[in-house]
């Protein structure tokens, strides 16, 4: 066999093995060195491919596809800085536990470290932000390494899918010529006849003695609290709520916990803690004797500060076997599947007869919701009312993607419990504003429709992501909240610096986003009143195209609205007595 035949056999077998391991989607960034990989992925009948010109956008597009599908997505690029542009998305995938297979084409060994063009050090270039690094080996003599590469591909998928899920880097050095040859029918059969190595994975559980010990702690607790952050354990929702009701514990449910929406019981679910824990009277009166934590650290800063001040037993449950304890308050880290933890413990804990503790949390929660709902009467456009109305409008089985900075925090405040199911997405691994549009496009393509709520700076940061939305006809509605700058900084101490604040933190841009909509062929509406907002949202339900709904707001008014709501709550709770056990 000549070079092209050998290369084609090796890479065809590699791509086919990934397909056998349920890699059904690939995002390709164009380039020369990746030519054979791009062609062979494109020609594989069981792999859907998306081309994204901008590598940074492509990385986040793959992230969104993998987030929504729960399956590993392949990400393919040429050599050099193209691979470096994937790095932000890889970091996000690593910390948010999303499976990606990052396949970087590379120059051959003899062109490394000799000033060859488009050549950088790609071996291990993503450092500690991938679960593992592999390099494919393509023999130029024979096919003796086919089985090795096949096992390597199976292993890479298994690692990406293993708990905690995450990205794996596969580097592929390739020599010219790069255009793969056409395999004859016999050769094709030889490639496809090879089978991927199956990987079976069990469930992480606790032993009987460990469960009995934990049940004693829970049975002795009179004032326990369950805190649920962003979840990889969506199937565990009903198990957690049943466990909480039996124990008589409130669940402080992060908006990304998937606990605030659905047909499961909401008896124990508390949503407005971010608001009422800012009140010192309430926060100081709520003193748990046990905290049980599931999922990632919560979005709410008020909740994090409250947790730091609690002196009690603190269990952190994590099936991903990592150290999720930024506050340093854990008394036990428990590596166990979250659903099995609840299912195994529920039958052996005592059902609490006196739910006084839970009732107090629910009373404060309901009073806070009443205060927050008062924003509905406001006539001027505001970010708070956008989220209140959005949370009430969300249709059944909605896929809602929320940007970082202020949008995720506003959602935390105004996403109240409702029986309509919805899946809430956000990039909270590294909490960056980059790549949000592209990630949301990936979610829309995987789940056939999505709604994105995003701020103007984050939108500007990833406008390139709209090209993939246009090319692949993504059914994506974007609520663009435009306060002409970095709204979150108005809530931080630097807002008091009147000299440098606007230039360094407020960063007004004055952009006309209607021009962006025209550039990418999006339907566009700029809202000037709430009637227009209602009409635009209603119309978006019937549209199956890229839609941008711009809502102009004012940063200073946003800060004042939050202060007003907090003041109203403070007035309400002056009449409340502190919790007494």
Image: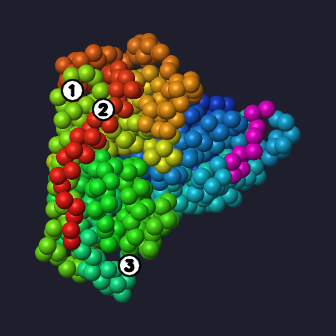
Neighbours of disc 1 within 10 Å: few (<14), some (14-19), many (20+): few
- For the residues marked 2 and 1, what is the alpha-carbon distance in whole angstroms? 10 Å
Q: Mark 1 points at which residue?
A: 378
- For the residues marked 2 and 3, what is the alpha-carbon distance in whole angstroms? 48 Å
The color scheme shown is: rainbow
Secondary element at tag 3: loop
Tell whether label 3 touches label 1 (CB within 8 Å): no
Image coordinates of residue 418 in percent, x first then y, are 18, 46
Neighbours of disc 2 within 10 Å: few (<14), some (14-19), many (20+): some
Task: Give the mark nearest the N terminus, 1 or 3.
Answer: 3
Residue 120 is inside the magenta segment? yes
Neighbours of disc 3 within 10 Å: few (<14), some (14-19), many (20+): some
Image coordinates of residue 140 in percent, x first then y, are 75, 49
Magenta-colored span: 117-125
Q: Can residue 399 be seen in this view?
A: no
Farthest residue to the right: give it. Answer: 114
Secondary element at tag 1: loop
194 or 204: nearer the viewer: 204
Q: Mark 2 points at which residue?
A: 561
- Residue at image coords 16%, 59%: 267
Please identify the quadrant where the C terminus is shown. Answer: bottom left
Q: Quadrant of residue 353?
A: bottom left
Task: Give the mark nearest the N terminus, 2 or 3.
Answer: 3
Tell whether label 3 touches label 2 (CB within 8 Å): no
Dominant secondary structure (helix, strand or loop) of the stretch shown in magenta: loop
Q: Mark 3 points at which residue?
A: 206
Position of 400 with respect to 333 (left or right) is left
Tell whether label 1 touches label 2 (CB within 8 Å): yes
């Amino acid at each position: 066999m000549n070079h092209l035949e050998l290369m084609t056999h090796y890479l065809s077998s590699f791509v086919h093995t990934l397909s056998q391991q349920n890699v059904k989607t690939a995002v390709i960034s164009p380039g020369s060195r990746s030519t054979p990989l791009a062609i062979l992925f494109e020609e594989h009948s069981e792999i859907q491919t998306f081309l994204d010109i901008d590598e940074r956008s492509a990385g986040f597009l793959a992230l969104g596809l993998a987030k929504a599908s729960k399956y590993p997505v392949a990400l393919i690029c040429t050599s050099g800085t193209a691979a470096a542009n994937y790095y932000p998305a890889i970091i996000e995938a690593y910390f948010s536990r999303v499976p990606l297979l990052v396949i970087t084409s590379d120059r051959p060994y003899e062109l490394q470290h000799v000033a060859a063009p488009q050549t950088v050090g790609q071996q291990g270039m993503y450092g500690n932000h991938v679960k593992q690094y592999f390099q494919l080996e393509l023999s130029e003599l024979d096919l003796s390494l086919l089985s090795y590469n096949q096992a390597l591909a199976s292993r890479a998928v298994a690692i990406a899918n293993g708990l905690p899920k995450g990205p794996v880097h596969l580097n592929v050095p390739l020599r010219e010529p790069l255009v793969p040859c056409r395999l004859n029918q016999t050769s094709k059969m030889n490639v496809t006849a090879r089978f991927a190595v199956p990987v079976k994975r069990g469930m992480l559980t606790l032993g009987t003695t460990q469960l009995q010990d934990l049940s004693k702690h829970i049975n002795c607790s009179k004032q326990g609290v369950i805190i649920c952050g962003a979840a990889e354990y969506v199937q565990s929702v009903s198990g957690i709520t049943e466990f909480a009701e039996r124990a008589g514990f409130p669940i402080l449910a992060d908006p990304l916990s998937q606990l605030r929406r659905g047909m499961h019981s909401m008896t124990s679910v508390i949503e407005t803690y971010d608001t009422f824990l800012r009140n010192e009277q309430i926060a100081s009166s709520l003193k748990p004797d046990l905290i049980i934590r599931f999922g990632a650290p919560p979005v709410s800063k008020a909740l994090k500060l409250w947790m730091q001040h609690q002196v009690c037993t603190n269990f952190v449950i994590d099936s991903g076997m990592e150290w999720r304890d930024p506050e340093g308050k854990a008394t036990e880290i428990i590596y166990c599947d979250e659903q099995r933890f609840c299912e195994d413990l529920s039958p052996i804990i005592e059902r609490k007869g006196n739910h006084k503790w839970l009732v107090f949390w629910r009373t404060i929660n309901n009073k806070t919701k009443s205060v927050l709902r008062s924003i509905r009467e406001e006539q001027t456009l505001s970010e708070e009312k956008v989220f209140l109305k959005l949370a009430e409008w969300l249709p059944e089985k909605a896929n809602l993607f929320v940007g970082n900075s202020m949008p995720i925090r506003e959602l935390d405040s105004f996403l109240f419990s409702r029986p309509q199911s919805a899946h809430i997405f956000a990039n909270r691994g590294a909490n960056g504003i980059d790549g949000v549009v592209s990630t949301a496009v990936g979610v829309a393509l995987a789940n056939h429709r999505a709604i994105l709520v995003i701020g103007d700076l984050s939108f500007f940061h990833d406008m390139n992501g709209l090209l993939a939305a246009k090319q692949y006809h993504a059914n994506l509605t974007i609520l663009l909240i435009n306060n002409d700058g970095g709204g979150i900084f108005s809530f931080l101490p630097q807002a008091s610096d009147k000299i440098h604040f606007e230039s360094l933190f407020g960063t007004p841009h004055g952009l006309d986003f209607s021009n962006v909509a025209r550039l990418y062929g999006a339907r566009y509406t700029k809202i000037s009143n709430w009637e227009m907002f209602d009409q635009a949202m209603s119309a978006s339900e019937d549209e199956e195209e890229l839609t941008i709904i711009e809502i102009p707001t004012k940063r200073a008014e946003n800060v004042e609205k939050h202060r007003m709501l907090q003041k109203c709550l403070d007035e309400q709770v002056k009449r409340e007595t502190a919790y007494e056990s």
